[in-house]
Amino acid sequence: MAEKDILEKVLMAHSDVFADCENALVYGGRKRLSAEEICPAPTESFYRGKDRIHSQFEDVSAYLTEKGEIKLQFLIANETALEGRQVLRKSSYQGGAYRAQLESGRPVYPVIGMVIDWTGKGTRIPLSLHELLRREGVAEEDLEHVDDVKLEVYHMNSLSAEVRARFTSDLGFVADYLNEGSFDNRRNQKIVHAEALCEMMEALTGDVRFTDQVEELLKRQKEGEEIVMCEYIDMLEARGEARGITIGEARGENKGETRLGNLIQALLKEKKYSEIEAASKNREKRHELYRQYNI
């Protein structure tokens, strides 16, 4: 799980992917963010525990800047195990980001947070602070005086085709594959971050074919060549066929050795030594004996 979390962060840390993720999911496909306006923001914030100050880390954080001035901060949590109190995590991370502005002396900017769920499972966790508090038995008359916090969760394994069509970065490959099991709808799209994409695909699917191609892809990109997804699909299929042939040959060889061994055991039991010699040298004789002994 830890490795998967890291690889999700690596792909999302690319400014074009981060901007694309926010545009597709938060802004409904509108190009609110561009890669050129995105710059990394701190992922660490602090809170006071019982006896000391503790630090907490959000997965990915970025600023939207205009003419060098921060206009927005975005927080993305990549989750492989959603918790029932997830909304409290969001409150804590956003609270840390606002706390950092308290004494900055600069204009205050909003902080937008969302959760990306990679589990492939549905969830019924509370999607607001009020909902969580209701489950804990808090009275409605008291909730009226409690500021609410909404939790935005996007389940990558159950995104509609309409939502997935909004992605223009490498993240679209991941979303399509998780939902359809293929890259067919993006055959003509260029791969930008080959290494991060391949490693994330292996982490999410367990299929090592994805990372088998990394060195070749990086080599071709280094030489200035653009890699379009249809070429990558061909490489994956070729690799799969090669593996299939190798596995088939190995299984066939093992099966053949087992069959011949059983025949020799049967002939030894009957002390037919001349038949053993004939079977080892002559294929037709060997298959005749297979039929005779029903092997």
Image: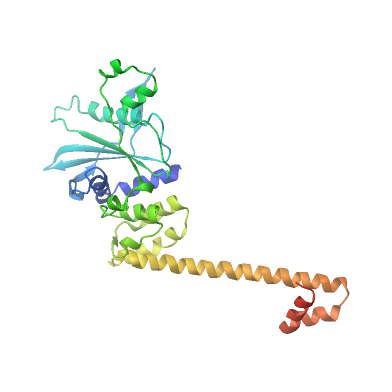
Image position of 293 (left or right of 270): left
Q: Is residue 194 above or below residue 44?
A: below
Q: Residue at x 57, y 66 (%)?
A: 247
Residue at the outermost front position: 140
Residue 196 percent coordinates (x, y):
36, 53
Residue 196 or residue 127, whichever sits in front: 127
Residue 281 percent coordinates (x, y):
75, 83
Residue 110, image quadrant: top left
Residue 37 percent coordinates (x, y):
17, 46
Q: Residue at x 35, y 65 (%)?
A: 219
Q: Residue at x 40, y 43 (%)?
A: 5
Q: Is residue 232 above or below residue 149?
A: below
Residue 96, image quadrant: top left
Q: Is residue 27 above or below residue 164?
A: above
Residue 153 or residue 202, whichever sits in front: 153
Residue 226 percent coordinates (x, y):
28, 66
- Name the image colouring: rainbow
Q: Quadrant of the C terminus?
A: bottom right
Q: Residue at x 21, y 45 (%)?
A: 38
All told, the count of numbered labels is: 0
Residue 238 or residue 294, whichever sits in front: 294
Residue at the outermost right position: 271
Image position of 72 (left or right of 277): left
Q: Is residue 265 above or below residue 211?
A: below
